[in-house]
Image: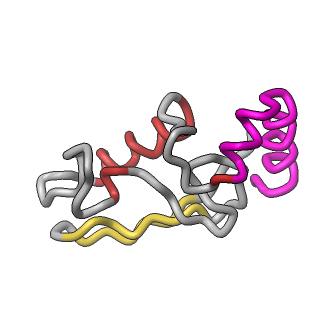
């Protein structure tokens, strides 16, 4: 089974530093690994940003959602990936699968 490597540097009073070390084609993750997830921000527009009461479990749940049901095509970090999805969903899926085959371990 393929896996994606995520690095987390965790200090409870500030948002953790999280980076995707596996190259991935995703609207909310850049090809260099930056991740757009509101709970990783100290101040979030939607009010779900980082708080000292959050735990590593919250981060893992948020990342899991990012890969399953929390894809954001309306406010993407990787605009090219989001536009690709809107333009051609089948080709987008093919590119995702290609990235998994080439870069996931």
Instruction: Tell me the quadrant of the picture where the C terminus can be found.
Output: bottom right
Question: Residue at position x 16%, y 69% from top?
Answer: 13
Instruction: Tell me the quadrant of the picture where the N terminus can be found.
Output: top right
Query: Is residue 60 within the magenta segment?
Result: no
Is 8 positioned to the left or the right of 24 in the image?
left
The scheme the figure's colours follow is secondary structure
Residue 71 position in % (x across, y down): 54, 36
Query: Is residue 82 within the magenta segment?
Result: yes
Magenta residues span: 80-105
Residue 41 position in % (x across, y down): 30, 61
Quick check: 60 above or below 16? Answer: above
Is 8 positioned to the left or the right of 20 in the image?
left
Question: Residue at position x 71%, y 43% from top?
Answer: 83
Is 64 positioned to the left or the right of 51 in the image?
right
Question: Residue at position x 62%, y 47% from top?
Answer: 27
Residue 77 position in % (x across, y down): 55, 56
**How many numbered circles are shown?**
0
Residue farthest to the left, as pictured: 53
Tell me the chief SS of the magenta region: helix
Residue 104 position in % (x across, y down): 76, 53
């Amino acid at each position: 089974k393929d896996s994606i490597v995520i690095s987390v540097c965790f200090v409870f009073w500030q948002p953790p530093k999280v980076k995707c070390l596996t190259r991935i084609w995703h609207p909310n993750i850049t090809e260099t690994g930056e991740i757009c997830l509101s709970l990783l921000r100290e101040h979030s527009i939607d009010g779900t940003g980082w708080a000292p009461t959050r735990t590593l479990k919250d981060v893992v749940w948020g990342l899991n959602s990012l890969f399953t049901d929390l894809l954001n095509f309306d406010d993407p970090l990787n605009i090219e990936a989001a536009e690709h999805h809107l333009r051609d969903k089948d080709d987008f899926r093919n590119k995702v699968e290609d990235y998994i085959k080439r870069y996931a371990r």
